[in-house]
Image (cartoon, rainbow, N blue to C red):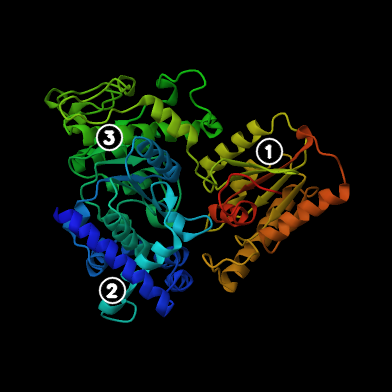
Amino acid sequence: MNSQIFTLLQKISKNMHIRHCACIKENYKDAIKKLNDLQSNSNYLEIVANNSKMNFAKLEDTEKYLIRSGINLDQLNNLSIIHVAGTKGKGSVCAFVEAILQIHGFRTGFFSSPHLITVRERLRINGSPINETDFAYYFWKVYNKLDNAKEFESDIPMYFKFLTVLMFNVFLYENIDVAIIEVGIGGEYDCTNIVKNPVCVGITSLGLDHTSLLGNTIEEIAYQKSGIFKPNTIAFTVPQKKEALEILKERAIERQCTLHVVPSFQYYEWENDQLNNKTLYSQIQQQNASLAIQLAVYWMQSQINPNYFLTINNDICNKKYYNFQENNIEGSIKNINDVKEEMINKKTNAKYISFKKIATALSMCIWPGRQQILRGTLFDFYLDGAHTLESMDCCISWFNNQIENNNGKRYLIFNMTGKRDVSLFMNLLKTIKFHKIYFVPNVAGIPDIDNLTTAEVIDEQKLKCQKHCEMWGEQSPHVVKIVANNVMEVLNDIRMEHIHNDETIIWKDKTQVLITGSLHLVGATLAILDPNFTMTTKF
């Protein structure tokens, strides 16, 4: 009864605040402008790189700001959380988990980063970004409390940390069943890691990225990512390089956390034509889907009966490594294939876990910008925000597989930020015969209030684009290369070239455009091609 009264009062307060906001113009646009005034994550990375690696480790600051926003740590512990870290595929895994839990009737909250078009994408309730009205309400509710409580002028969280505090406020007041939280950077010191008691955690594929923060070796990366392990919590990971897996094992022992390696996607007994999501044909997405299945099923089991336990790969989950006493676990099941529609816990009359629903969820899951295809009238666009060598290799394999029977011209739209060795990425991309290559900043070229990139940043990116163009030209002088100002300029150039040709297009001759190197570039492109995520385009 008390919780119902609390929820009712929150709704009344929220409606009153929305009307108040309308009067004093504390609306969505004002909220976005104020949010963008906070230091961005890219600025944050630069500051940290120039100082100590450990400067970003101030989790106590996140706790301080959370408490100032009106939420104490006991309230935070009331959230039922699935926490996911890793180098590649974090967002995809979380999106799959969200889809599986939604189709089973649970109310989900999903926190992700970065956003592609609008910052509201980072805060999803039941599969949809929070609307502008609710975003403005929660933003000003949190911002005003933090602003009033600051002890000195800069005593307010930066962009990502602010969004993390905002996220916990939204999820607590929206009365969700489960919070699916994607780590921002690393794990050990990421500001999402104030979570003390997650139901389960996941580690996706590990590779070298953000090395100025996390270390220059796979072992150092694994150490940082496994920082989300918590005592008496279950952790799942995909198959990793031997060196990385050894670190994950050691950290599991240190943190008294039980670790499992998920099986291959082929391990599951899929029926014919049960899966129709073409993104699941790639090995990396199959791996992500397997991790998502294990996380979602374990979470659902914890809701049915805390004594249920999912074990796989017993050679990895050895009790001598993980203090795991299998005999003490009642009702233990050995693999996901035992979780069928007939599995009903009669003691609690709980909803059953449906393997058919899991297959449907995976097939219907949409996570834009990751191995995504948009088919237009004249062009097919292939969008993948690959920004590590491993993910770029996967992107190229995926692209080559998709265009295998196509004779059309191939275009590349490329950008890469940060301190990565771009020549290594170019060597991979040069295996594809492109008709023309565009080097372009992560700027759409259309009005955009959510992503206010400063002129200084744009100029800096353009200089890098010029260098990238020169680097490519040194080894491939005969390929047409263009440095453009924005994505709209690039798309218009490609379109005009085809209008001048005045050719009748058949599907085998359709032009193929690959956009890769940065999720922000992919987002800028989607803002033009498909701003509402309809999965279609008129280009």
| Left or right placement of residue 410 versus residue 259 in this view | right
User: Which numbered mark, 2 or 1, is in the foreground of this view?
Assistant: 2
Q: Which residue is mark 3?
A: 300
Mark 2 / mark 3, whichever is N-terminal: 2
Q: In whole angstroms, how far apart are the C-alphas of marks 2 and 3?
A: 36 Å
**Mark 1 neighbour class, 10 Å CA radius: few under 14, some 14 to 19, many 20 or more:** few
Q: In whole angstroms, how far apart are the C-alphas of marks 1 and 3?
A: 44 Å
| Left or right placement of residue 387 versus residue 173 in this view | right
- Secondary structure found at label 3: helix
Mark 1 / mark 3, whichever is N-terminal: 3
Q: Which residue is mark 1?
A: 431
Q: Nearer the viewer, residue 439 or 110?
A: 110
- Can residue 239 be seen here? The reply is no
Q: Are marks 2 and 3 in contact (CB under 8 Å)?
A: no
Q: Are marks 2 and 1 in contact (CB under 8 Å)?
A: no
Write the residue at 39% across / 54% down.
184
Q: Are marks 1 and 3 in contact (CB under 8 Å)?
A: no
The location of residue 34, given as percent across then percent down, is 43, 73
- Secondary structure found at label 2: helix
Q: Nearer the viewer, residue 119 or 187?
A: 119
Write the residue at 39% across / 29% down.
357
Looking at numbered disc 1 in the image, what kind of residue is underneath it? Thr
**Mark 3 neighbour class, 10 Å CA radius: few under 14, some 14 to 19, many 20 or more:** many
The location of residue 171, given as percent across then percent down, is 30, 55
Q: Which residue is mark 2?
A: 145
